Image (cartoon, grey):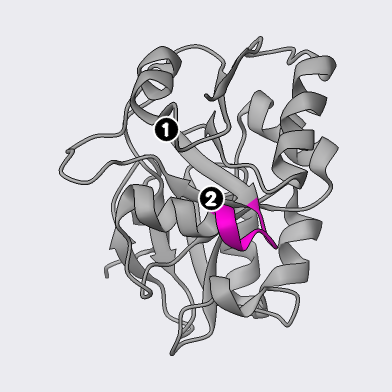
């Protein structure tokens, strides 16, 4: 049975946030809101929770997991960004973008793309997610809560609890969430490539014409 946390969207209750973080640190898997849509999240070192994300979403080993980071300084510990791309990424965070970048040695191997040795990173502006990250002190491994065969992610905490009650450890509800996942930008080769158009405007990463 998943625990259900009703968290204030602007001022998340510290007691609830600390309980969620305790679950994460004990190999827990959570469903939580972001500034784009609901996501599944777990600790970087938790193989069990990671396997559960793969199972729930039926993902293969080529799927890029995302590290949801608290701030830009933390993001910089886990990926390498060259100077040309640094400003574009910084200007787009926090926001509904996921960036695929070369991973540093801080990232566990099981989270890396097997051939490219890359990982997704993002910084969310959602208050509840930010509160969890601040209390956890490290990134959350994150994946859009999009179930196999579905066109859109679920938007309501209670329906997530109903659908995933026996496979996640907690559902964090801060009110209705959006349905559009992040825009995914692959920066690993130096030239931006849009892999998925989502909530973030992709135009800022496309070469200007003329």
Q: Residue furthest bottom?
A: 115
Q: Is residue 47 magenta?
A: yes
Return the residue at label 1. 37
**Residue at 32% across / 69% down in the picture?**
60
Q: Can residue 207 be seen from the camera position used here?
A: no
Residue 163 position in % (x across, y down): 33, 26
Return the residue at label 2. 142
Query: In the image shown, does 203 or 171 lie closer to the viewer?
Result: 171
**Residue at 37% across / 19% down in the picture?**
162
Q: Which residues are magenta?
A: 43-49
Marks 2 and 1, the one that precedes in the sequence: 1
Residue 94 position in % (x across, y down): 62, 43
**Residue at 71% across / 53% down in the picture?**
139
Around disc 2, counting alpha carbons within 10 Å, would you say few (fewer than 14), some (14 to 19), or many (20 or more)? many
Q: Which corner quadrant of the image does residue 89 belong to?
A: bottom right
Query: In the image shown, does 1 or 203 lie closer to the viewer?
Result: 1
Picture layout, residue 134 above or below residue 131: below
Q: Is residue 188 left or right of residue 68?
A: left
Q: Can residue 29 be seen from the camera position used here?
A: yes
Secondary element at image label 1: loop
């Amino acid at each position: 049975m998943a625990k259900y946390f009703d968290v204030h969207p602007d001022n998340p209750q510290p007691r609830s946030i600390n309980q969620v973080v305790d679950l994460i640190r004990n190999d827990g898997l959570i469903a939580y809101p972001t500034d784009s849509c609901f996501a599944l999240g777990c600790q970087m070192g938790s193989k069990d929770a990671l396997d559960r994300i793969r199972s729930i979403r039926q993902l293969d080993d080529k799927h890029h997991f995302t590290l949801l980071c608290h701030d830009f300084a933390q993001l910089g510990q886990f990926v390498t960004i060259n100077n040309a791309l640094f400003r574009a990424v910084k200007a787009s965070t926090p926001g509904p973008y996921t960036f695929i970048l070369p991973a540093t040695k801080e990232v566990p191997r099981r989270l890396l793309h097997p051939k490219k040795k890359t990982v997704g990173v993002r910084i969310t502006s959602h208050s509840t997610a930010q509160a969890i990250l601040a209390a956890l002190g490290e990134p959350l491994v994150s994946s859009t809560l999009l179930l196999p065969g579905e066109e859109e992610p679920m938007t309501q905490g209670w329906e997530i609890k109903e659908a995933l009650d026996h496979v996640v450890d907690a559902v964090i509800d801060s009110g209705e969430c959006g349905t559009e996942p992040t825009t995914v930008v692959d920066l690993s080769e130096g030239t931006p490539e849009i892999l998925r158009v989502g909530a973030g405007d992709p135009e800022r990463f496309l070469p200007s014409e003329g």
